[in-house]
Amino acid sequence: MECFSSAALLAWQANGVAAVIDGQFYLWIALAVGGVGLIAAFGFARFVLASDTGSAEMQKISNAIRQGAEAFMKRQYGTIALIAVILAIILYVGYRVSPYTAPYANKVVISFLIGAFCSALSGQTGMWVSIRTNIRTAAAARISMGKALQMALRGGAVTGLVVGGLSLLGVGLLFWWFGGLRNPEQVPYELVGFGFGASLVALFAQLGGGIYTKAADVGADLVGKVEAGIPEDDPRNPAVIADLVGDNVGDCAGRGADIFESTAAENVGAMILGAALYPVFGLKGILFPLIVQAINILASTIGVAVVRAKEDEVPMHALNRGYFVTTVLALAGFAAAVYYMFDAGQHPIRWWLFGCGICGIVMSLLFVWITEYYTETRFRPVKAIAQASTTGPATNIIQGLAVGMETPALPAIVIGAALLLSYYFGTLGLHDVTSVSDYAKGIYGTAIATMGMLSSAAYILAMDTFGPITDNAGGIIEMSNQPESIREKTDKLDAAGNTTKALTKGYAIGSASLAAFLLFSAYLASVHDIVQQRVADAGGILPTNWSFSNVNIASVPVFVGALMGAMLVFLFSSMAIKAVGRAAQTVIQDVHEQFRDNPGIMEGTSQPDYGRCVRIVTGAALKEMVLPGLLVVVMPLCIGLIFRHFGKEFNTTMILDAPMLHGVPMNLSGAESVAALLMVGTITGIMMAMMMNNGGGAWDNAKKLIETGMYGGKRSEAHKAAVVGDTVGDPFKDTAGPSLHVLIKLLATVTLVLAPLFL
């Protein structure tokens, strides 16, 4: 019997060593591809920076945009760094005060700071290249539209690949450094700080950039188009440079940090859920998200490289070809990963897990199509808003709000279907596994669906950054008085850029919704493991039928937490929109003063003081971004701590259901109320973000539809009404809406990091 036991032990150890070696192989592949992504980004950047920079007049305008953007980013990231350091100290102290969390304090804080640094670096790097790509795209447009399109997309690809590469390297290296190859089931929990740091920077980058870009845009439009009757990007408008700067700090740096946060948080959350399947797949189940991220980088690099456009071709057709190539390659790579990492060759039932990935990919395509339907000029919603503009601003706003409130319906159905199908496919794919609960199987299926949706994220981000680059290029051409034929080329590219920006907002909220559900599941798993550890340390045994997968909404603390989650979304949105309004007022006042004090501006005999507007918007945006951002971090912390200490009396079922610690039922009210805040805040945030994104996009394109000549064209009464509606929609689609993408993921990551403090 002893000989048999020794032989079994040796066999198990041999298998364990083989599994570790196998896992190491996939980890090194992921890290190598992360490096390849950064090298590819460097190659695209070198291609762009080696290109022609146009005339001296074009360079003068481009330099003003670049200087304004860099000045804002320097001040913004200085503010964010100060906030991050203060939160890191608070996080460290919070972890050190409890003997249960003290051993993890150093690793959580280190991962938090590294996540924040990588998120900031990805946004900074992408914007650094984009503000140098705009002039080169404008110069390329003087030669051919196809060359200009390729220039703008490759400049945007730098952001996408840097985001993907840094996310992959950051999570992968921390996993290795923290001993993930030796203790793979525990280390993913120590990486939650990375997602929190990425989320924190993303929120402030998106919120600050969104306030900046829309304050400048609203001010420039209301005074320039409505009052003065001058065209968009007219050099006589003192706010025009601030407007062009805003395109970069909001849509390039802000969206880059947003997608970085999605990929980082998704990787960490999926690795936590994969740890539950360690007995089944070993390290491969935990490292699978990193391999999918590597596939995203390779597929997106090839997709960007193959894009070519003919001179007379619609630009979106060329961009869609690249997206199709990226999606096909990602799908093939996903299938290969399932085959090799989940042993689908020996266990055909595992192909159901590939079906989970397909659910995510199909969901991303449907989200793009739904967003296109609600924001494109050729479909009913935008046409209805344009028609409503003929009777004035009031009917335009009524119709726009109605369209915005309609837009969450189809996406909600798609999200629900994707979650249900991927959960079901997950249980089918792991049907033969008896050591894991059906809930864990299904939740891992939803995690794979999230990976599928993010499997083309780098190309999507390249298309998103394409938008502000082409917008800036058009402004440079307009302000440098280039021939009308060149402006027509940049107008086509700008129109395509407006479409890509709208579509990627739809993609971003879709990925955020799946990532938030994934992180919510990771939060529940984290609380369960913390409770299990504390009961074991006290010499007890956790009841086998107890799980933290159910939260009783009839409990008063849980209901209050849910109520606070919904309230948080509305309060945050209100603060973001009011911030744009206040900042825009300062811009409008400055433009009025410049027109009044210097009549030569409108006559074209003197130049406005562009720098004054840039400085005003910079100061206002940085001042306004702090309070809404801190609200998102403080709210779940307060709810969790309050009900941890005072919620016991309200929970009538706790004595019967709660695990026992030293003979006393554990008070789970803090963790449960935060779970309710997270779930209801996520649902409310998703609905609100879709309403704002698509409603604002529809308002914008209704104005553009009228500018093509419908209902009297530019300077008509319908056009003035549409400009007012577009102005209302601007903070919806470019400030509050995109910031809500980040808010729902930040809520998830902050609760995941702070979970030990709620028990």
Image (cartoon, rainbow, N blue to C red):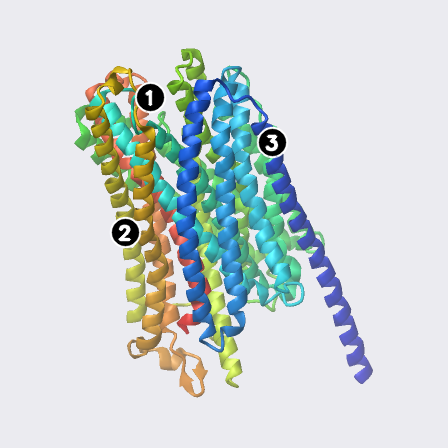
Mark 3 and mark 2: Cα distance apart in space: 44 Å
Which residue type does callout 2 highlight? Phe
Instruction: Identify the mark nearer the N-term, 1 or 2.
Output: 1
Say above or below: 214 vs 390. Answer: below
Task: Give the left or right position of residue 262, taking residue 688 as reference.
Answer: right
Q: Which quadrant is the N terminus positioned in?
A: bottom right
Mark 1 and mark 2: Cα distance apart in space: 38 Å
Which residue type does callout 3 highlight? Arg
Query: Between 591 and 328, which is closer to the camera in this rendering?
Result: 591
Q: Secondary structure at mark 1?
A: loop
Q: Quadrant of residue 82?
A: bottom left
Q: Which residue is mark 3?
A: 46
Q: Secondary structure at mark 3?
A: helix
Q: Position of residue 284 (x, y in %)?
A: 65, 58
Q: Which residue is mark 1?
A: 235
Which residue type does callout 1 highlight? Pro
Instruction: Identify the mark nearer the N-term, 3 or 2.
Output: 3
